[in-house]
């Protein structure tokens, strides 16, 4: 493959909070867009196309809400389209912006979006509607009990316990305390997590991500444009997506096409990204990872799908040894990750943005020293749609 | 759009009107996929990327690409969704192939009619503070656009009637056996100044396209390829109040991009066939103008002279357009697929002989907010 490189030249993250009553939905998109534009130093005239990042419309209470965001992202009379792959939407939008440039059609593309999950009433009521209305919606499934079943299965297969889950939360909260953009920044203890109430066994309140409101934006450009304009950039060197079955029942019991404990499609997606980036030994080559894990238990199988452990289940012991902390061998979610901030439409975009900041050396107090190669992931649907990316300095 | 690698259309399946109640949506999508692959003469194993346009509101689900992923072969594959418009799936699919990273893409869109009120579905897409209470739906926005045109150009009503008669004539030839299941349609409501038949009742429909890289096409010796010569797309502003509804600068911007890619400087004389947005016949007239096929001062004369009818100089909407069959959300991708088939020589009953180049235009949203233009050619210019 001989595709010219695509670089990240600007990043904008709004304040992520429980509620953003100071800003309506287009205002939030604009806030993030303005920050990304300031970061890259370009004007809107230089943006040639826009990819809009928005997951379920019902979360903001407006159908095709991207139409209301057109002016906020400066897209009037420009190429504009929207992506929705559920929780993976943000990384899928970065990928779509990448394809605009890698195709040779455009040199500078903005991707932006926002969400008001914290103000939608109850996100689980919305997310119940992702399942088939006849067979699985009525159980009733939500994303929490859906992944609680995965946690039970993972614990059964690999020996994870609730203290192991709590350890992930404690690590990510410490990381988030260093990240001024994070929603949950209070440092907590394993005892705090264990003492929090069950939401869906074995997942407790503090094992869950928050419902966040906020926006995110990134500006991507071609290598030619970056060099001609002497811009600073980090590079997307690998990307891919992979989907697994829609049906929860197909991941359980006899005849299963996937095991609900694992994240085999995420692993396939990482393999695609690694192949493209020339990564053959992720444990040696990856310096930092931002992996989409909205519940503590899912960080384990995400680490394993990314090849940052030798085998399934091994990440539990490595987590105990502190290998995935800042200062550890391969820090995972130094931003605090999805567990500490989840404005769904842009959560997976922020995974890419945070890794970009890391390899750029611009991650502030959460900087992983010497990070030059990072990986990011996004999970969407009922743990079904996965996107992955490799970003290098 | 003018990318690094040439992209062609090698397979198409168009179902502009599907009888409801016979198959589930999943079965419809599975059948569309199979038929698109069969038309291309390849199996699903040759598809390594998929872009669908899955719209949650029309499908009555959140993240409806989830449901679609299985029936279209998405499991184990790289699949994305563009819920903004069906035609945006084509755009993104073409971009992905043009990168050289994907030899093929399956591109799909569909539009069911199971919602209890499509008008309510559309009304939820309005701004909740300013326009939702009007109440506004897409038909009302199209009527506002028609009204603005009638005010600006009094003779436009006659031209619109002529376009309507033309497309219904074309549709009777193109799809004589297609069902027009009008479940949920209220034929008594035609917002002024629209008259009966000026918006076809909604029907269930779907469309699949197989895109491939030049290398893949040459390696496998495909014939009947529609090469993408140029693509452009653009959006109008969000608020209707910020727009002059008689003008479509977004369409002109999209056409400029597409024509630049295709090297077209005289669009009025560049094409053998066209398929354009026609949710109302007024939209088709605006498309003539925005695409540079016929300026608005000449609508009356040239439409009356039959220039855009089957026997005319530039037949437009030989398929009958969405004035004949109106699967609302996927009408845009159908316009694109129809032109691809004309160029491939596979348009069936409505095939025009000797089509070498065609133009497709798609519009979506309130009063044509999104506009997409695609130019297809038969010639493999500059092939390796």
Image (spheres, coloured by chain):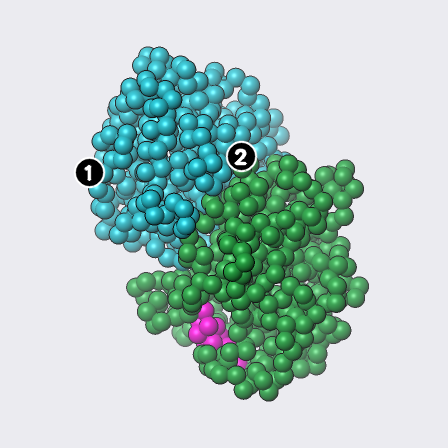
Chain colours: A green, B cyan
Total labels drawn: 2
The residue that disc 1 covers is B188
Q: Identify the residue at horizontal 36%, vertical 47% (top origin).
A: B132
Q: Are marks 1 and 2 on the same chain?
A: no
Q: Is residue A32 above or below residue B285?
A: below
Q: Is residue A316 above or below residue A285?
A: below
CB contact under 8 Å: marks 1 and 2 = no
Q: Quadrant of residue B317?
A: top left
Q: Identify the residue at horizontal 61%, vertical 38% (top origin).
A: A48
Whole-percent x, y for residue B280 in the image:
32, 31
Most extreme residue toward the left, as rendered? Answer: B188
Residue A374: mark: none
Q: Identify the residue at horizontal 37%, vertical 50% (top origin).
A: B124
Residue A77: mark: 2
Kindly state the secondary structure of the residue where label 1 is placed.
loop
Q: Residues within 10 Å of mark 1 (few under 14, many from 20)?
A: few
Whole-percent x, y for residue B6 in the image:
57, 34
Whole-percent x, y for residue B24 in the image:
29, 54
Range drawn in magenta: A143-156
Quarter occupied by the N terminus of chain B: top right
Q: Is residue B226 visible?
A: no
Viewer-proximal residue, B62 or B157? B157
Mark 1 → mark 2, Cα distance in angstroms: 35 Å
Q: Is residue A55 above or below residue A206?
A: above
Q: Residues within 10 Å of mark 2 (few under 14, many from 20)?
A: many
Q: Identify the residue at horizontal 44%, vertical 18% (top origin).
A: B295
Whole-percent x, y for residue B380 in the image:
55, 27
């Amino acid at each position: 493959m001989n595709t010219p490189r695509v670089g990240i030249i600007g990043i904008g993250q709004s304040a992520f909070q429980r509620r953003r009553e100071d800003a309506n939905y287009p205002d939030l998109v604009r806030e993030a867009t303005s920050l990304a534009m300031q970061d890259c130093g370009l004007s809107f005239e230089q943006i040639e196309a826009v990819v809009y990042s928005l997951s379920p419309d019902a979360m903001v209470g407006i159908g095709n809400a991207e139409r209301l965001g057109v002016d906020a992202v400066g897209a009037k009379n420009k190429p504009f389209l929207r992506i929705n792959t559920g929780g993976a939407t943000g990384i899928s939008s970065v990928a779509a912006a990448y394809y605009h440039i890698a195709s040779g059609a455009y040199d500078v593309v903005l991707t932006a979006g926002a969400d008001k999950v914290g103000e939608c009433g109850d996100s689980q009521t919305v997310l119940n509607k992702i399942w088939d209305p006849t067979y699985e919606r009525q159980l009733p499934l939500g994303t929490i009990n859906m992944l609680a079943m995965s946690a039970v299965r993972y614990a059964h297969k690999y020996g994870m316990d609730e203290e192991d889950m709590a350890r992930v939360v404690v690590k990510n909260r410490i990381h988030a305390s260093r990240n001024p953009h994070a929603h949950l920044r209070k440092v907590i203890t394993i005892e705090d997590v264990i003492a929090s109430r069950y939401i869906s066994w074995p997942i407790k309140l503090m094992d869950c991500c928050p419902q966040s409101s906020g926006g995110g934006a990134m500006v991507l450009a071609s290598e030619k444009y970056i060099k001609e304009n002497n811009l600073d950039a980090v590079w997307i060197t690998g990307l891919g997506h992979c989907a697994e079955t829609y049906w929860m029942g197909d991941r359980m019991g006899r005849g299963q096409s996937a095991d609900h404990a694992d994240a085999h499609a995420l692993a396939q997606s990482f393999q695609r990204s690694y192949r493209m980036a020339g990564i053959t030994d992720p444990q040696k080559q990856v310096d930092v990872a931002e992996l989409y894990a909205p519940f503590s238990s899912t960080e384990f199988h995400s680490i394993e799908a990314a090849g940052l452990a030798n085998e399934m289940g091994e990440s539990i012991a490595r987590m105990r040894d502190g290998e995935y902390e800042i200062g550890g061998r391969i820090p995972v979610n130094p931003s605090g990750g999805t567990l500490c901030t989840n404005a769904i439409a842009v959560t997976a975009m922020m995974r890419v943005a945070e890794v970009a900041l890391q390899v750029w050396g611009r991650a502030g107090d959460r900087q992983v020293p010497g990070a030059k190669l990072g990986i990011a992931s996004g999970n969407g649907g009922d743990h079904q749609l996965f996107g992955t990316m490799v970003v290098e300095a | 759009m003018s990318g690094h690698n040439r992209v062609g259309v090698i397979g198409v399946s168009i179902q502009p009107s599907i009888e409801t109640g016979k198959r589930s949506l999943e079965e419809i999508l599975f059948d569309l996929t199979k038929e698109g692959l069969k038309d291309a003469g390849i199996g699903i194993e040759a598809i390594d990327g998929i872009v669908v346009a899955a719209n949650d509101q029309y499908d009555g689900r959140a993240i409806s690409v989830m449901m679609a992923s299985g029936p279209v072969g998405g499991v184990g594959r790289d699949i994305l969704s563009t819920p903004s418009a069906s035609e945006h799936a084509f755009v993104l699919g073409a971009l992905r192939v043009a990168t050289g990273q994907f030899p093929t893409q399956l591109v799909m869109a569909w539009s069911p009619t199971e919602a209890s009120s499509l008008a309510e579905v559309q009304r939820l897409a309005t701004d909740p503070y300013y326009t939702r209470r009007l109440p506004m739906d897409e038909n009302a926005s199209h009527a506002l656009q028609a009204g603005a045109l009638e005010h600006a150009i009094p003779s436009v009503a006659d031209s619109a009637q002529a376009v309507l008669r033309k497309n219904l004539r074309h549709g009777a030839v193109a799809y004589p056996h297609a069902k027009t299941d009008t479940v949920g349609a209220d034929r008594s409501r035609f917002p002024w100044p629209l008259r009966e038949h000026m918006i076809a009742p909604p029907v269930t429909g779907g469309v699949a396209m197989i895109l491939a890289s030049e290398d893949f096409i040459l390696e496998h010796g495909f014939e009947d390829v529609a090469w993408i010569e140029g693509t452009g797309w653009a959006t109008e502003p969000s608020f209707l109040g910020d727009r002059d509804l008689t003008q479509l600068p977004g369409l002109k911007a999209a056409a400029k991009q597409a024509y630049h890619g295709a090297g077209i400087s005289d669009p009025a004389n560049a094409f053998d066939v066209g398929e354009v947005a026609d949710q109302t016949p007024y939209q088709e007239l605006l498309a003539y103008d925005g695409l540079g096929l016929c300026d608005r001062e000449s609508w009356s004369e040239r439409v009356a002279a039959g220039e855009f009818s089957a026997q005319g100089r530039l037949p437009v909407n030989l398929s009958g357009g969405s004035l004949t069959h109106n699967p609302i959300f996927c009408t845009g991708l159908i316009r694109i697929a129809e032109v691809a088939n004309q160029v491939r020589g596979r348009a069936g009953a409505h095939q025009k002989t000797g089509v070498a180049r065609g133009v497709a235009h798609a519009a979506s949203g309130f009063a044509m907010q999104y506009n997409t233009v695609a130019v297809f050619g038969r010639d493999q210019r500059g092939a390796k």
